[in-house]
Image: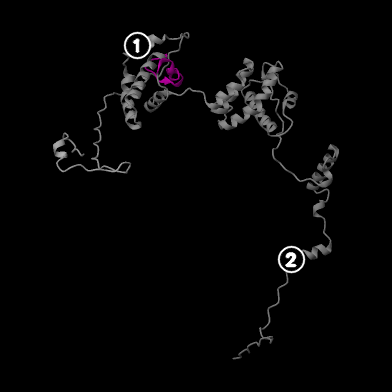
């Protein structure tokens, strides 16, 4: 039974020529009239400029849950009116339901009472408190980011990993490690200047130095300024990639602290880095040699480099082997005539 768009259903007219039967569970696509696109609504919100200053809290006080919910019902200011059109556009673009759109509006009203400076940009740490008051986190963050009113102060993955590794350290040592991490992630624009490093590099450095600084803290050390070069060498792993990570991490750590004049000396100064996955073929008789034999071989190699000793691999080979492997330099003979007779040279014509 069909119904013309814009007209009421007429049962008598629809049954005048009978009914069309269809088989069940058959694919059938009805040709429907195209839907009209909604007309664009005029923009009602005015421009909004957030405050450039921040009001610092004198003391921390947990807000009353019921009071905040009650006041959020009647909240209305320039920030909410500015975000009203953005909420409507997001709802139309991502298919939000009416309930989700109302939840976002209620979340924005709640944020006006949770932030210390109403009318300023909203920090992401304040948005993370919304579930306690019945608000929505993800949708509110999307709207505030689209409006340019979000201050993303959430800790990154590296910062959370660093906080978990340094939670039990003494306060002076933890403060020194925080200075190093800040320079690694954000760089330094003051002398000595330094570019920021990749977060994965900082993570590998943390993996290398975390067990060492935890062992120093367990041994009773309160600050990294008490560490000596001997203690650094004793704390390094014996071999493998862990030793390489620890060496690079400690050199970076004490290098930054020494440049910022947090420690007096750099205990890693002059410390070499152990190579990783460096395979070198040795002679059959060199395996298991004493350190003295290895030192003698290194001296011999140094003498060969300076021309005082002949190199064993450059000695003159026997004459037979030299002729055997010598490259053929003579020109090959030209092939003869196929029939076995020599070719007759054409006579020269004398003019």
Q: Quadrant of the N terminus?
A: top left
Residue 182 lies, in percent from the top left, at: 56, 24
Give SS at disc 1: helix
Residue beneath label 2, please?
327
Q: Is residue 95 visible to us here?
A: yes
Sequence-first tag of 1 and 2: 1
Magenta-highlighted residues: 115-134
Residue 226 lies, in percent from the top left, at: 70, 18
Determine whether, in the image, residue 298 is placed left or right of residue 133: right
Residue 97 lies, in percent from the top left, at: 33, 27
Determine whether, in the image, residue 64 is placed left or right of residue 324: left
Is 126 within the magenta?
Answer: yes
Determine whether, in the image, residue 269 is placed left or right of residue 111: right
Please report the residue visible at 80 percent of the width from the left and 45 percent of the height from the top.
301
Q: Is residue 10 visible to us here?
A: no
- Say which quarter of the image contains residue 236: top right
Residue beneath label 1, please?
71
Please report the residue visible at 17 percent of the width from the left and 42 percent of the height from the top.
18
Q: Nearer the viewer, residue 136 or 300?
A: 136
Please report the residue visible at 45 percent of the width from the left and 9 percent of the height from the top.
62
């Amino acid at each position: 039974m069909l119904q013309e768009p814009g007209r009421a259903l007429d049962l008598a007219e629809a049954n005048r020529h009978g009914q069309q039967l269809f088989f069940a569970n058959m694919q059938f696509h009805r040709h429907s009239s195209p839907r009209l696109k909604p007309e664009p609504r005029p923009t009602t919100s005015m421009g909004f400029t957030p405050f450039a200053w921040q009001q610092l809290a004198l003391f921390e006080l947990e807000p009353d849950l019921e009071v905040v919910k009650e006041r959020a019902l009647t909240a209305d200011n320039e920030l909410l009116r500015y975000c009203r059109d953005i909420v409507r556009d997001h709802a139309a673009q991502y298919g939000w339901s009416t309930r989700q759109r109302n939840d976002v509006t209620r979340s924005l009203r709640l944020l006006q009472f949770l932030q210390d400076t109403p009318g300023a940009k909203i920090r992401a740490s304040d948005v993370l408190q919304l579930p306690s008051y019945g608000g929505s986190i993800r949708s509110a963050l999307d709207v505030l980011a689209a409006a340019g009113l979000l201050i993303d102060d959430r800790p990154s993955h590296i910062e959370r990993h660093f906080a978990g590794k340094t939670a039990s350290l003494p306060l002076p040592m933890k403060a020194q490690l925080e200075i190093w991490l800040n320079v690694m992630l954000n760089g330094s624009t003051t002398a000595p200047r330094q570019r920021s490093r990749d977060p994965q590099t900082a993570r590998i450095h943390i993996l290398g130095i975390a067990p060492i600084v935890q062992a120093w803290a367990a041994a009773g050390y309160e600050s990294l300024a008490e560490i000596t070069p001997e203690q650094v060498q004793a704390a390094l792993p014996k071999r493998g990639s862990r030793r390489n990570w620890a060496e690079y991490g400690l050199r970076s750590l004490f290098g930054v602290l020494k440049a910022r004049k947090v420690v007096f000396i750099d205990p890693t100064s002059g410390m070499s880095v152990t190579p990783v996955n460096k395979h070198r073929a040795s002679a059959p008789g060199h395996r298991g040699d004493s350190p003295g034999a290895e030192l003698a071989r290194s001296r011999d190699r140094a003498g060969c480099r300076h021309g005082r000793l002949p190199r064993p691999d450059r000695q003159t080979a026997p004459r037979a082997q030299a002729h055997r492997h010598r490259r053929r330099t003579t020109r090959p003979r030209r092939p003869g005539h196929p029939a076995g007779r020599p070719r007759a040279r054409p006579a020269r014509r004398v003019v």
